[in-house]
Image (cartoon, grey):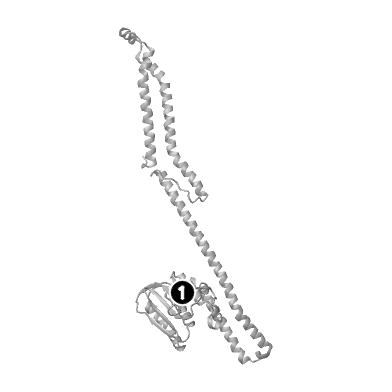
């Protein structure tokens, strides 16, 4: 019966109940009627019974007998109907009452709440659907909480970035303003316009470059979403990227070694991936001294960029991908850059879901940047 749908189940219960009541009622009439008749007309012997039967009307006799037995039969049938109805109602309503109690707990966001499924009829299906719906609701709420946290962290990151950007721009702008003001007032050495106008121009170019980098870094995550992905050959992609840095390192007496014998393809937004790799190469070349080596090679679907230098301390390494952060040995803007190169790399690679590592090397001493593809 547990596998029946609720309509045939109800029909079966009702039919069995009615048949049971009818059978009991007729059985009572069949059993009680003769006894009632015998009590109405006592028989002492066979002769007297024949005489009475000829005198009494049989129809009247049966009618009186049934009328006497009917109240007893009716009362018994009513009591049996009440008992059966109570059992049937209890069996039908208990699952619904349990579902009602559980849904109240669900309304209070009790994560342990779950409807018990005892059958496979419509009530069982309803309980199972409520459980699935509640689990989906909890999962959606959890995802919304995660997304809320992510958005909050993203907004905080933007605020921190803008604060850092304003702080970084403040220094060159203040220096430029002071120089121009002294030139206008003709204070001391600033009367020499031919010397200080080129310096002002360099400051303006520095500020312009910083603003450009700030804009590029702020658009990095959005650019990944907008740029289509294409299938690219990594070896063919890296060769033209390495060429300008080979010229730079040659001019500075740095050895630039490229080994791209491994050949594989992957699907990426090529333009932004090239920008990330180019920033890593520029960072490696910038921090490599004359006579040292920069190496680029492929190993088991990994791009590895190494440069011989003084390994970065652990305390600086964990902050290296923050905007405008420069280690103590590279705080000068002329030598240490603007502090956005690795921040842009981190932003782009995270947006493309590409894992990477940046760690010190022991033999030879230096740093190794690994991009997992």
Rendered position, 218 above or below 7 = below
Residue sitting at 46 percent across and 74 percent down?
358
The one of 219 and 359 positioned closer to us in this rendering = 359
The one of 95 and 343 positioned closer to us in this rendering = 343
Q: Quadrant of residue 250?
A: bottom left
Residue sitting at 50 percent across and 59 percent down?
144
Residue 225 seen from this side? no
Q: Quadrant of the C terminus?
A: bottom left
Residue sitting at 51 percent across and 46 percent down?
104
- Residue 330, percent from left and from top: 54, 80
The one of 291 and 100 positioned closer to us in this rendering = 291
- Residue 281, percent from left and from top: 45, 80
Which residue is outermost to the front? 362
Q: How many numbered marks are there?
A: 1
Rendered position, 320 above or below 183 = above
Rendered position, 121 above or below 19 = below
Q: Quadrant of residue 241?
A: bottom left
- Residue 25, percent from left and from top: 38, 25
Query: In the picture provided, is 169 more to the left or to the right than 277?
Result: right
The one of 201 and 6 positioned closer to us in this rendering = 201
Which residue is the site of mark 1?
358
Question: Which element carries disc 1, helix, strand or loop?
Answer: strand
Label 1: few (<14), some (14–19) or many (≥20) C-alpha neighbours in 10 Å:
some
Q: Quadrant of residue 116?
A: top left
Residue sitting at 40 percent across and 19 percent down?
69
Residue 84 seen from this side? yes
- Residue 263, percent from left and from top: 34, 76
Q: Quadrant of the N terminus?
A: top left
């Amino acid at each position: 019966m547990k596998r029946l749908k609720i309509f045939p189940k109800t029909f079966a219960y009702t039919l069995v109940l009615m048949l049971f009541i009818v059978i009991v009622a007729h059985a009572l009439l069949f059993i009680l009627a003769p006894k009632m008749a015998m009590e109405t007309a006592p028989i002492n012997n066979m002769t007297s019974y024949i005489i009475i039967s000829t005198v009494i009307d049989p129809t009247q006799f049966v009618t009186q007998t049934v009328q006497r037995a009917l109240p007893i039969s009716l009362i018994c049938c009513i009591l049996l109907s009440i008992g059966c109805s109570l059992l049937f109602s209890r069996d039908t309503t208990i699952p619904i009452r349990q579902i009602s109690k559980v849904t109240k707990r669900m309304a209070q966001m009790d994560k342990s709440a779950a409807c018990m499924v005892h059958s496979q009829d419509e009530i069982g299906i309803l309980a199972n659907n409520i459980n699935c719906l509640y689990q989906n609701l909890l999962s959606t709420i959890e995802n919304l909480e995660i997304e809320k946290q992510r958005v909050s962290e993203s907004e905080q990151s933007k605020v921190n970035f803008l604060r850092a950007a304003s702080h970084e721009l403040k220094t060159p702008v203040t220096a430029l303003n002071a120089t121009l003001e002294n030139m206008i007032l003709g204070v001391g050495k600033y009367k020499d316009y031919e010397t200080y106008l080129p310096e002002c121009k360099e400051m303006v170019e520095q500020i312009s470059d910083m603003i450009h980098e700030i804009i590029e870094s702020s658009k990095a995550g959005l650019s990944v979403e907008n740029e289509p992905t294409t299938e690219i050959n990594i070896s063919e992609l890296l060769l033209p990227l390495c060429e300008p840095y080979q010229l730079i390192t040659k001019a500075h007496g740095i050895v630039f070694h490229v080994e791209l014998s491994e050949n594989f393809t992957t699907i990426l937004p090529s333009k932004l991936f090239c920008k990330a790799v180019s920033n890593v190469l520029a960072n490696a070349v910038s921090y490599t001294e004359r006579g040292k080596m920069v190496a680029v090679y492929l190993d088991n679907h990994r791009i590895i960029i190494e440069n011989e230098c003084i390994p970065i301390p652990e305390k600086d390494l964990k902050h290296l991908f923050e905007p405008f952060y420069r280690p103590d040995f590279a705080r000068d803007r002329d030598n240490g850059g603007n502090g956005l190169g690795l921040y842009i790399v981190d932003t782009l690679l995270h947006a493309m879901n590409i894992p990477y590592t940046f760690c010190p090397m022991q033999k030879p001493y230096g740093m190794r940047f690994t991009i997992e593809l």
